[in-house]
Amino acid sequence: MPDTDLVPFEPPDYASLRAAFRNVIESYPRALYDEQHLVRYRTWFVDSVLVSVPELIHDILVVRAELFRRDDLAQRLLSPLLGTTSLLTAEGADWKWQRRVAAPIFRHEKLLALVPIFNAVAVRQVERWGAAANERPVDIADSMSQMTLEMIVNTMLGGPGALDVQKFTRALTTYLDSFPWRFILSMFRAPWLPYPGRWQTARAREHMYREAARLVAQRRQTPSASADLLDLLLQAGDEETGRMMTDDELARNLVTFILAGHETTAVALTWTLWLLAKYPHVQDQVAAEAQTTIGTGSIEAQHIERLTFTKQVLQEAMRLYPPVPAITRQPLAPLMLGGEQLTPATQVTITIYPLHRNRRVWKNPDTFDPDRFAVEQIKARPRYAYLPFGAGPRVCIGASFAMIEAAVVLAVLVRAFRFKVVNGHRPHPVARVTLRPRGGMPLFFEPR
Ligand code: HEM
């Protein structure tokens, strides 16, 4: 499937601050794509190492994971909303016990029980779109964002109506849009300085926290009929210490799960649908798999395993457009990495976007080819060459949740509609924590 049109941009050679502000992935040097490489740059305000070597990534995230922590920059960006003790932001023992508490909720069999909820939300999306089909392009980035938030609300937070989904999505977008400014100010260690939209950002953050705290308080008073994830978090004590989560920890974790779980999955689905629109024969294969596996009825848990090609399409889409385009860390103490002496101040960035297009690992890296994720091909590659969900102890806890949810959504949507690109529209990936298409993702669709 040769395709030159798919190459969204050629990275510039010089990692400029301006490029980092506009879109951090554009500041990654070419070496990270061409060779397996480690790039270091130091200025008076930053000491940074960029890594796209599978062996070194294995070292950082797995072998010596205990010697690294989440970096200061990420903490400064996330902690105003998530605090410093949510699953995403906590460190050491504080993190460990929360991970132990949350892990059982994300076990495969528990997630398969959520398939009817995923199916119902996706079917509602089909009904909503049914009337609008083929009239004018629809921004599917926006639709996916609202749909995946609905998924989280319906599986975790007590079902339809628990949150005003549109209002929450708007608040989240406002919050994420402030990241470039806050990123720069944090880099200069001046996060208190004013920036455009600061008050809207603060209001958006307060709205999200207040809503999460309201859900926790409500649930304390009125237990839900069906045990959802919030219930499980409320009841779960640490097996080793018996400690339970406080209301603040619960609220911060709810926002964490919403933030970490909904935008990432929305972005993954958005890029996948665009790629399918661009490659109609692959789209037809996904539709055929859904039709033969599921027929015309509802998707059920036993179908998930058989949606093999659909999952390969998702994996390949997340290779080309990783929803989390970089993972960052800082060493806890001085250490050597790939011949470089790092200090506790060195920011280590695992550059997933270049890693997934590295010419040494991937043949024709800019080509969309779901067959790369056939079992034999996966086995032939270095394990740490593909990391949409990270790796090691802090690997995404919601990876299976996301894969099951996204497979259901794709099967239901592609079974119902044929998606088509809007001529002349070439989406451009921009990193705003997640890898969003700049200006949205308009697509046409018609009933199949
Ligand atoms: C396609 C969808 C998703 C992608 C690409 C994704 C990606 C990631 C990545 C790369 C990390 C590791 C970050 C690091 O090491 O610094 C991570 C962590 C995390 N993810 Fe996901 N994620 C997705 C969906 C979800 C979902 C659905 C949930 C929850 C329902 C979730 C919850 C979390 C949490 C809580 C963490 C922090 C885990 C920890 O530090 O122990 N994610 N995710």
Image: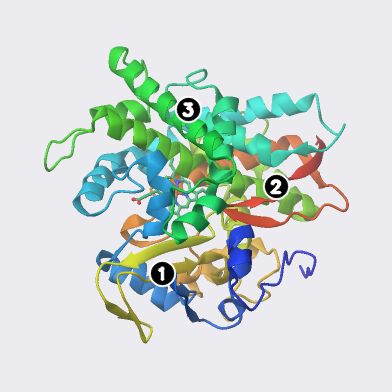
Whole-Å distance between the Cαs marked 3 and 1?
Answer: 32 Å
Which mark lies nearer to you, 3 or 1? Answer: 3
Residue type at mark 3? His
Q: In which quarter of the image is the C terminus?
A: top right
Is 183 located above or below residue 12 in the figure? above
Amino acid type indicated by mark 2: Leu
Q: Where is residue 148 in the image (x, y as percent from the top left)?
A: 56, 36
| Most distant residue in the top direction | 222
Q: Name the residue under label 1.
A: 348
Disc 3: which residue: 207
SS category of the residue bearing label 2: helix
- Residue that carries the numbered disc 2 in the rendered image: 273
Q: Nearer the viewer, residue 165 or 284?
A: 165
Residue nearer the viewer, 277 or 312: 277
Splitting the image into 4 quarters, where does residue 211 fall? top left
In the rendered image, which quarter contains the N terminus?
A: bottom right
User: Is 190 rendered above or below residue 174?
Assistant: below
Residue drawn at 58 percent across, 81 percent down: 31
Q: In this view, does 381 lie to the left or right of 288?
A: left
Furthest-bottom residue in this view: 339
Residue 171 percent across, percent down from the top left:
55, 33
